[in-house]
Structure formats: structure tokens, C-alpha cells
């Protein structure tokens, strides 16, 4: 087993007594000492741990990267350690044990040692019994022992990762417009992706036997054509050193819903293999590989709101801190993506030039929600958009004041400004025109609005319908109401928007 050990150290001076702010150590707040003099919260314990991680990865965090985060307003030292831990995972290692020694006359560590231990253990992904904390005044021989600041040394032990567990993400399309039919059988689409918290759990272990074995909580999904298996084969083709692996997939995201559950699984699989084998592939390279598996995969590797173009491989991040909650309603019926595109072609007047089944396979493999720049639309495209019924942006259409082409940009601007009303006002999905059960769609949207949703629409090519709520309490209340009145067989889920930003190289 590959085991490595690293030492981390850091120290900070206290601000003057009476200075506003909190003394924070190991994520715990101490009242018996002033804050530290630092650009961040000055959590010298977490800084020392972060430096220890850098000693393994050889990637310095408490330098240019932390300084840039500070300038962006991120002063919580837990955020810096999380960046370091992502580097550690990419290098193919996981934490095993941490020993921390604190030198200082103040604050008193023992009353909050357990709280510190719990906080650090969560950040490192280890048990609380694997975090040791000791403290000393050093007999007052140093400035730290005389109460002028705090110094911390720590010893971090890590091992080569044998298992990676990933909580996947899914997505909704806050806007989705089909622009045209491409010569290769796909469609040009413009969309605003929003990753959401509804997730599966993917566990990937190294195995002695060659190839991949997949066990799924839904046995019908264990076939060799599962997108998780395809992600493994794609990575293995590029990097032959990858060995066999055993995968357990626990499904929570409903299939055939337009939520990109399979794409989230594929994104997690690529990331898991990257970490398990220490490949250190940058996110943009993983996204390029993901685009070969499905149009939604790159957005779920990016892990933040984005305007998608092309088939999903070109993403423009939409920087937002807006958090909103959702109620998802999944009817019993699933809408096959290929069939939905064919129906939409008829509605929008796109000419297939005699093609029959050539488009079905690509769209069953390349999940809905890809996008492309708006181009000149074919005859018949404008009128159907203007006739779009009971969408959240429908009041604009046909008024001449706002074109449907503008709605994605309007929704994206709303996200950036933190204006949920603006997002909801612009939300739309052109696939609602092709839904086979329009009465059912209208009913579910109506029930969501009556339950307090600020907007309600279908995601992707369906069949899931979701409502946007301002807070978790109103969403939970709506879920309870809906479960009592929705059609039999409908499933109801809660979730929220997720923006865990990654930096593209």
C-alpha cells in the first residue's frame, strides 16, 4: 500500500484586544481571544492542514490561489482546505489520519476540541477518531506561549485511494430552445443549464479482474451499454494503465425524466477514475471526454449554471450565488428523447430531407439539453414559438417586445444578479410543444403554481415537471400538498440549485 506522510505548519498573530471579529480555529469559534490578523478568517489550524495537503500534492494553495479567493470575497479557510482536498483526490490519495499540535496561551482549546475534531474530520473525509488534537503553552518561552498569537504543526497521513464514492448531480433546463436540425442528425439547441441536488451515489473500487463490473439498485440498468460502462471504456481507451473496477450505482434520480441522471452518473464516473488512478486530468479535458458520452455531461462536470452551445461541449459559465429550491414531479410515463425530437421537428417545421431513424440513436445517447448559437430559423419555426401556450415566458411571446431568442440571456442575467423573479419570468422549454400528454403537463404545472411555485415547466425533453420556490420551507410544504392531489403513480422529489464552481484550465 502506498502511504505518505506530510508536515504542515502555520502561525498568526492576534489583532488587538477588543477588535471586532471572531477567533476561529479548526472551524470552531472561540470567545476568549481576539481575531487573527489575516486577509482570511485566519484559521491557523486549517491553514496548517492545507499546507500539509500541499506537501503531498506539490500544489500550493495558501499562496496565489487563496489570495485570489480572498479577493473574490472567500475568506472561510474551510474553502481553501476543500480546494486542497480536491487536489489530493485528483492525485489519487485520501486522508487516513491527522495529528495537530497547537502552541498558544489563548484561547483555551480543550472546551472545543471535540467540535474542532468533528469539523476537521468532515473536511478530510475521515472519522473523528482519526483526528488527534493536543495543545501546549510551551511554558511561555515563545510569543505564542505569551499570548501574542498561535502556532500550529500537524502531521497528515494519506494512502493511495482504493475506492471513490461520488454523489452525482442532475440538472434542469431553465430555458431550452431548439434552433435547427443539423446534417449529422443532431439538433442545434440553446439552453441554460442549472445543476441540482437530486443525486445518485456512485462507488468505484479497484478490482483485480479486467474490465468493469456494474451493480445497480435498478438491475435493469446493469447492461454493458449503461453510460457508466461507456465512460469506463472511453477512459480506458485513452489511458490503458487503468485497471479493472467494480462499480455500485445507487439510483435516486428517475430515468426518462429529462433530469440528466445518466449524464450525472457518467460525469461522476470520469471524475472517479481520474481520482482513483491519479491521472490529474484538468476539468476541461474531462468535459471534452464527457461530450462524447452525452450532451449534458460537460455541464455536470462544470457543476455550475451555464449557457450551453454546440451539443453541450461549449459552455459559458453563469456566475451566480443564487440558491433556490425545487419540487420535481415525475409522471409514470417516460418520453423517449428521439421521439420527442421527431415530434418537435414536425411542430417547428424542420425538414428532415427524407431522414427516418437516423436521428433517434444519437439523441438517445446524447442527452437532451445541448445548445448552440442562434442561427436563422427555418420557415415555420417562429410561429410555433409564438403560439407556445402557458409557459412562464408565454406572456412575452407574440407581444413584439421580447423575442424567444432573448430569454436564455435574460434568465442568465437574472441568475448573475440574484434576481429569482427575473429567472422565473424568462423560464421556458420549447419541448412542451411536443408533449404527448398536454393535458397532464398543464395539470401538473397548474398544481405546482397553486402550491406556491414562482414558475413551473418541464425539463429537457421530459417527462419531469418542476416548480421553483424561494425557500426550502415553501418547497417542502408544496411537496406535501402535491402528494395528496397529483395523478396516481406520480413521484415527487425535493431539491435545490447547486453551483460548486470549478476553474477551467
Image: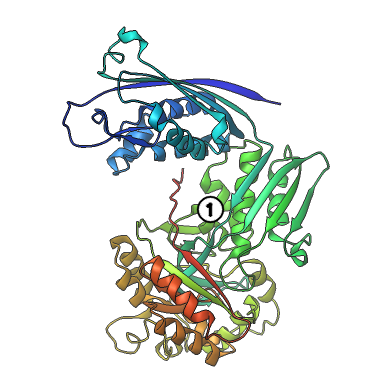
The image shows residue 176 at horizontal and vertical percentages of 47, 74
* Residue where numbered disc 1 is placed: 301
- Relative to the observer, which residue lies in front, 288 or 354? 288
Image colouring = rainbow
Is residue 374 among what the camera can see?
no
The image shows residue 56 at horizontal and vertical percentages of 54, 25
Name the residue: 30% across, 9% down: 140
Judge from the rendering whether residue 501 lies leftward or rightward of residue 271; answer left or right: left
Is residue 87 among what the camera can see?
yes
Name the residue: 57% across, 32% down: 129
- Relative to the observer, which residue lies in front, 65 or 237? 65
- SS type, badge 1: helix
Query: What quarter of the picture does the N terminus occupy?
Result: top right
Q: Examine the rendered structure and indicate whether residue 70 appears above or below residue 422.
A: above
The image shows residue 202 at horizontal and vertical percentages of 65, 52
Total numbered labels: 1
Judge from the rendering whether residue 418 lies leftward or rightward of residue 46; answer left or right: left
Judge from the rendering whether residue 130 lies leftward or rightward of residue 389; answer left or right: right
Amino acid at each position: 500500500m502506498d502511504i505518505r506522510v506530510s508536515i504542515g505548519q502555520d502561525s498568526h498573530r492576534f489583532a488587538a484586544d477588543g477588535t471586532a471579529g471572531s477567533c476561529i480555529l479548526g472551524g470552531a469559534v472561540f470567545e476568549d481571544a481576539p481575531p487573527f490578523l489575516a486577509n482570511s478568517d485566519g484559521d491557523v489550524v486549517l491553514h496548517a492542514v492545507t499546507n500539509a495537503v500541499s506537501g503531498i500534492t506539490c500544489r500550493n494553495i495558501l499562496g496565489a490561489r487563496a489570495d485570489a479567493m480572498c479577493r473574490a470575497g472567500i475568506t472561510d479557510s474551510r474553502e481553501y482546505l476543500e480546494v486542497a482536498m480536491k487536489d489530493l483526490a485528483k492525485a489519487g490519495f485520501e486522508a487516513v489520519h491527522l495529528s495537530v499540535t497547537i502552541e498558544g496561551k489563548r484561547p483555551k482549546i480543550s472546551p472545543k476540541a471535540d467540535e474542532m475534531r468533528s469539523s476537521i474530520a468532515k473536511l478530510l473525509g475521515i472519522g473523528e477518531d482519526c483526528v488527534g488534537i493536543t495543545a501546549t503553552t510551551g511554558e511561555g518561552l515563545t510569543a505564542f506561549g505569551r499570548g501574542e498569537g498561535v502556532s500550529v504543526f500537524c502531521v497528515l497521513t494519506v494512502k493511495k485511494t482504493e475506492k471513490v464514492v461520488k454523489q452525482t448531480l442532475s440538472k434542469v433546463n431553465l430555458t431550452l430552445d431548439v434552433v435547427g436540425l443539423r446534417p449529422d442528425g443532431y439538433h442545434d439547441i440553446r439552453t441554460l443549464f442549472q445543476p441540482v441536488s437530486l443525486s445518485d451515489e456512485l462507488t468505484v473500487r479497484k478490482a483485480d479482474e479486467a474490465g468493469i463490473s456494474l451493480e445497480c439498485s435498478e438491475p435493469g440498468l446493469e447492461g454493458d451499454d449503461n453510460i457508466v460502462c461507456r465512460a469506463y471504456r472511453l477512459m480506458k481507451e485513452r489511458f490503458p494503465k487503468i485497471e479493472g473496477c467494480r462499480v455500485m450505482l445507487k439510483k435516486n434520480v428517475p430515468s426518462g425524466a429529462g433530469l440528466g441522471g445518466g449524464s450525472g452518473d457518467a460525469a461522476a464516473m470520469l471524475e472517479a477514475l481520474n481520482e482513483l488512478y491519479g491521472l490529474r486530468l484538468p476539468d476541461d479535458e474531462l468535459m471534452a471526454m464527457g461530450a462524447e458520452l452525452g450532451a449534458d455531461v460537460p455541464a455536470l462536470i462544470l457543476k455550475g449554471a451555464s449557457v450551453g452551445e454546440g451539443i453541450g461541449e461549449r459552455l459559458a459559465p453563469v456566475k451566480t450565488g443564487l440558491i433556490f429550491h425545487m419540487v420535481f414531479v415525475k409522471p409514470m410515463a417516460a418520453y423517449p428523447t428521439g421521439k420527442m425530437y421527431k415530434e418537435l421537428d414536425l411542430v417547428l417545421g424542420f425538414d428532415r430531407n427524407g431522414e427516418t431513424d437516423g436521428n433517434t440513436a444519437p439523441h438517445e445517447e446524447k442527452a437532451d439539453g445541448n445548445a448552440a448559437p442562434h442561427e436563422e430559423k427555418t420557415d415555420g419555426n417562429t410561429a410555433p414559438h409564438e403560439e407556445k401556450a402557458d409557459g412562464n415566458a408565454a406572456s412575452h411571446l407574440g407581444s413584439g417586445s421580447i423575442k424567444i431568442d432573448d430569454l436564455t440571456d435574460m434568465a442568465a442575467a437574472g441568475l448573475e444578479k440574484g434576481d429569482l423573479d427575473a429567472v422565473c419570468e424568462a423560464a421556458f422549454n420549447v419541448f412542451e410543444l411536443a408533449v404527448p400528454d398536454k393535458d397532464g403537463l398543464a395539470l401538473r404545472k397548474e398544481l405546482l403554481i397553486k402550491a406556491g411555485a414562482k414558475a413551473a415547466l418541464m425539463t429537457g425533453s421530459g417527462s419531469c415537471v418542476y416548480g421553483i420556490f424561494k425557500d426550502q420551507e415553501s418547497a417542502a410544504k408544496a411537496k406535501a400538498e402535491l402528494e395528496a392531489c397529483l395523478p396516481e403513480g406520480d413521484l415527487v422529489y425535493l431539491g435545490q440549485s447547486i453551483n460548486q464552481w470549478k476553474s477551467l484550465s
